[in-house]
């Protein structure tokens, strides 16, 4: 009889414990949902990406600080970059962005990370980028202290891996990523007794590529094996080129520099013509929206288009005096 009472008491305690655990889990889920909701970008509803949920019912709570916040809106100008990138990630897990410097590839990646709630693991590729930077290494003496690289952390925890200017990286280093980006979906760490790291279910990859041009020193052709693993390729260009002037870019310049619309239009006219000449190979630099905004800020302060251009777009264009004269004459003609 005594044993039966003890069993009944234990049973009741277990039932209470189950209810407590259930309530506790429910409370945690509510807190996480609120946290996720509070991190939704105010720009989320602007883009038609609602049907592409990249991590359904999964939260990156531990790495929430790696999710970008308050990223400025992107001047899409009808190219639908945001939805095309998210669609590519949803169907293929990875994609490549191609375009000259200043066209907003990195800006787009940061905005995508914020819109989709993905922690961002970023690697700025260079000629000296090594497999240690990507995968990890032992530090100290012996084989006791292993430090994971960005790629290994991304594989373990998920999120968005961004390889910026991937075609500057040595091909033998880039080839280490081949089994990660194909059907195998894992990384073999030869430096760590051939440990195999499987790719996280919600891990996505974006690479950016600068075109093969003289001003992009160190850029080379991608290995065809690596290139084939990028399922989708999206070309980026400037929102305003030659006679095509983006009203959204005019508004952006006005908002950031507080100049009037007529002046913003003239500044962008100069920038659009410079971009045309750059794409044609006549000059070595095409100004980004940020470059034009810097010019507009100084112009708003001095009221002199040439003086403000001498400190911004003219020296950035070239070290050659003849090319600088081309830009000066262009500014004078537009502001005459």
Image: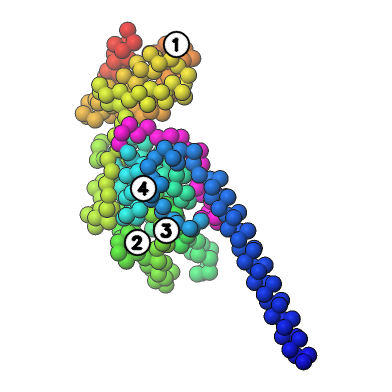
Q: Which of marks 2 and 4 is in front?
A: 4
Which residue has dot 4 on it?
Answer: 86
Question: How far apart are the two marked residues, 2 and 3, measured between alpha carbons?
Answer: 13 Å
Query: Do residues under tags 2 and 1 come within 8 Å of each other at their CB atoms?
Result: no
Q: Nearer the viewer, mark 3 or mark 1?
A: 3
Q: Is any atom of residue 317 visible in this view?
A: no
**Residue at image point 73% right, 89% down:** 4
Residue 99: x, y in percent? 29, 38
Neighbor class of circle 1 (other Cα within 10 Å; few <14, some 14-19, many 20+) is few
Question: How far apart are the two marked residues, 1 and 4, measured between alpha carbons?
Answer: 43 Å
Which residue has dot 1 on it?
Answer: 303
Secondary structure mostly seen in magenta is loop
**Residue at image point 42% right, 37% down:** 46
Mark sitting earlier along the chain (2/4): 4
Q: Which of marks 2 and 3 is in front?
A: 3
Q: What element carries label 3?
A: loop
Query: Do residues under tags 3 and 4 come within 8 Å of each other at their CB atoms?
Result: no
Which scheme is used to colour this image of the protein?
rainbow
Residue 306: x, y in percent? 38, 13
Q: Which residue appears farthest toward the top when viewing the image?
A: 336
Q: Is mark 1 on a helix, strand or loop?
A: loop
Mark sitting earlier along the chain (2/3): 2
Looking at the image, residue 117 lies above or below residue 331: below
Range of residues picked out in magenta: 60-79
Neighbor class of circle 3 (other Cα within 10 Å; few <14, some 14-19, many 20+) is many
Q: Residue 202 carries which label?
A: 3
């Amino acid at each position: 009889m005594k044993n039966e009472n003890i069993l009944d008491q234990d049973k009741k305690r277990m039932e209470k414990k189950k209810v407590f655990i259930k309530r506790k889990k429910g409370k945690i889920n509510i807190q996480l949902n609120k946290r996720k909701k509070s991190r939704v970008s105010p720009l989320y509803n602007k883009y038609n990406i609602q049907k592409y949920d990249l991590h359904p019912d999964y939260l990156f709570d531990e790495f929430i600080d790696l999710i970008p916040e308050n990223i400025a809106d992107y001047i899409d100008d009808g190219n639908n970059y945001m939805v095309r990138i998210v669609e590519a990630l949803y169907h293929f897990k990875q994609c490549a962005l191609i375009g000259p410097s200043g066209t907003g590839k990195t800006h787009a990646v940061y905005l995508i990370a914020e819109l989709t709630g993905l922690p961002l693991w970023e690697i700025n590729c260079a000629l000296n980028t090594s497999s240690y930077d990507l995968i990890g290494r032992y530090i100290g003496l012996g084989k006791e202290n292993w430090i994971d690289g960005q790629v290994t952390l991304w594989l373990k925890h998920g999120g968005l891996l961004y390889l910026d200017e991937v075609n500057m990286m040595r091909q033998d280093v880039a080839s280490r990523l081949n089994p990660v980006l194909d059907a195998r979906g894992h990384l073999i760490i030869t430096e760590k007794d051939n440990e195999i790291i499987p790719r996280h279910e919600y891990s996505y990859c974006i690479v950016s590529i600068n075109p093969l041009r003289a001003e992009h020193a160190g850029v080379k052709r991608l290995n065809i094996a690596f290139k084939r693993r990028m399922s989708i390729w999206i070309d980026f260009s400037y929102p305003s080129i030659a006679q095509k002037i983006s009203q959204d870019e005019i508004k952006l310049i006005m908002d950031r520099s507080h100049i009037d619309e007529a002046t913003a239009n003239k500044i962008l006219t100069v920038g659009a013509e410079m971009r045309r000449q750059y794409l044609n190979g006549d000059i070595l630099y095409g100004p980004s929206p940020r470059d034009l905004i810097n010019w507009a800020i100084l112009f708003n302060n001095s009221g002199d288009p040439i003086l403000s251009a001498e400190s911004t777009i003219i020296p950035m264009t070239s070290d050659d005096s003849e090319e600088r004269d081309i830009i000066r004459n262009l500014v004078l003609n537009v502001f005459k």
